[in-house]
Amino acid sequence: MVAAIEPPMVVADRVSKSFGSNEVLKSISLEVKRGEVMCLVGPSGSGKSTFLRCINHLEVVSAGRLSVDGELIGYREANNKLYEMHPKEAARQRRDIGMVFQRFNLFPHMTALQNVMEAPIRVKGLSKAGVEANARTLLARVGLAERADYYPAHLSGGQQQRVAIARALAMEPKLMLFDEPTSALDPELVGEVLDVMQGLARDGMTMIVVTHEMGFAREVADSLVFMDGGVVVESGVPTEVLANPQHHRTQAFLSKVL
Amino acid sequence: MTDTAATGGKTEPGIKAIRLHHPWRNTFAVVLLLIVALFVADAAMRPAYDWPAVGKFLFDQRISQAAFITLQLTVYSMIIAIILGVTLAIMRLSPNPVVNSIAWVYLWVFRGTPVYVQLVFWGLIGTIYQSIDIGLPFTEPWVSFPTRVALSAFILAIVGLALNEAAYMAEIVRAGLLSVDSGQEEAATALGMSWFQTMVRVIVPQSMRVIIPPAGNEVISMLKTTSLVTAIPFTLELYTRSRDIAAVTFDTVPMLIVASIWYLFFTSILMVGQYFLEKRFARGIGDRRPDKKANDATAAMTGVTPVIRSGQPTVVLPPTDPNQGER
């Protein structure tokens, strides 16, 4: 944990999101400190994935302010007015925010190594040699050094997800978002992905994790946020929230998943 | 729960069964062969086919030159059509409404009128626009030259074929682009790639697998559509040339056979090319057409003797030993 004098990494101030008349997020306010690991839990349809997607502007918020590292996401503010951001600026903001998807979304026509190398070369314009060395280091870090030249189709789900994590890390993000990273995996493969994430947390990465893995939340997360119906119902230290949930909706949810 | 009595590691000998026979398949094949043989024997004798004339004209220099021009027309117009088609397809999917509308109008016009009519129009362009002027509107042009000199019938034929074909290619490419999982675009976007980079690096390469089979179709179709450029009029390609020769020698049927043989020869070559292109773009996905490497036999089961009793739920579990691969 880093000293509290530094500004938080993520600040959500009364963030709302609607799809048509369907309000998915209702005035979400929360803060994620630097180096903090936050787990977002809740029933499906509670808005936790949408909130995550808002953070890197894959979805546009309808109301409220959302900022990462002190920078407003998706808009530019000047003279008390908000200006829509040019896609190029939005892309620049996303560089610093890594995202890992439930369905991995690796590029199937590229090998594991090429997947990891793609963005640093194309987006940052770095030289191929340096990027390759770094990519191999990252693949070794997620335990896949020998699988560098495999295509995603020839990797197991757990291995694919670890490549996806390495791919996100290759952009040297200051924040990592995980959208149910283990939900599409066979139970026996969940552990290897959680291990990698735990290693990241240990190295001080700021992480927001949407998950159903309460064990991971309890052991790794610094804070746990329970969402339901588009609002934050309860939040706090994971061990406390999990052991002694205050709100009846939290109690009902936890009684089903624990 | 489960009752999988694995009896040691002993493997039973492989099954040796008497093969299932298909008597009707064989009968049908024999009948077909007989019919074909009859037709061939008859065709060989029939004077209208005039095989000696076919042999004489097949490698006639006028014909082989015309065949080469047909091939040129096909290749050049297809190259332009593919480039323009990809551009139009990307334009149609672009978030920019102006760009999007331009592509829509293009498709509306070029797909909505017959290619023959379009070719006649291109042929008349020298009459409609007698000179090509470069300069500011309503002032004296800086450069001016007659359209007929600048655009030969050959160039007009290529332009006419290419612009029409581009409209069809655009739809094929668009279908391919739409076939790529939306998660791919999201992943690329989340990495900070621009829309254009996402298209070129991620979406287009994956869509090639879907695009190539119908695009191959279009190339073959184009080879044959070149026979329509007589509408321009451009008369040096294979079909018109062989008709012209037949008009003088009265060898109508043999000349048709000669032209057909050349068309078949080219389409066969194109089909081989398509096969290799498909293999190239199946990288990373191709389990449907496996490499030889991936073909080695793996025993999915060895000596398993499960006992599943009726009226009892049975669950198949993965190995309980969590010795996870190479980690």
Image (spheres, coloured by chain):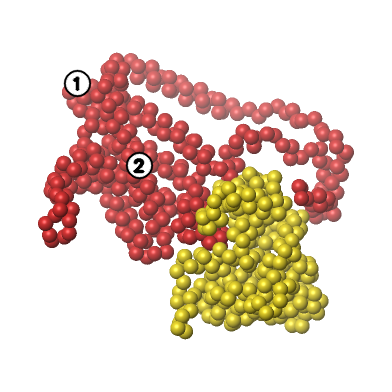
Chain colours: A yellow, B red
Pick out the residue farthest to the right.
B8
| Residue B260, quarter of picture | top left
- Residue B58, above or below A94: above
Q: Residue A229: image x %, image y %?
A: 64, 78
* Of the pair A202 and B126, the residue shown nearer to us: A202
Tag 2 subunit = B
Q: What residue type is labelled 2?
A: Met
Q: Which chain letter matches label 1? A: B
Q: Which badge, 2 or 1, comes first in the chain's sequence?
A: 2
Give how far across and how far down residue A168 sits, in percent. 62, 59
Residue linked to disc 2: B78
Q: Distance between the residues labelled 2 and 1?
A: 34 Å
CB under 8 Å between discs 2 and 1 = no
Residue, x 41% and y 55% (percent of image)?
B90
Give the amino acid at mark 1.
Answer: Thr
Q: Position of residue A252 (x, y in %)?
A: 75, 77
Label drawn at residue A40? none
Is B102 situated left or right of B24 in this image?
Answer: left
| Nearer to us in this view, B142 or B47 | B142
Residue B11: percent from left, percent from top: 82, 34
Q: Name the residue under label 1.
A: B249
Farthest residue to the left: give it.
B140
Query: Which residue appears at 59% of the width and 66% of the height?
Result: A97
On the picture, is A177 further left or further right than B108?
right
Q: Nearer the viewer, residue A161 or B133?
A: B133
Secondary structure found at label 2: helix
Residue A213 placement: quadrant:
bottom right
Direction from residue A148 to residue B145 in the image, left or right: left
The image shows residue B198, relative to residue B305, as above or below, that is: below
For the point 51% across and 27% down, the residue is B28
What quarter of the picture does the N terminus of chain B occupy? bottom right
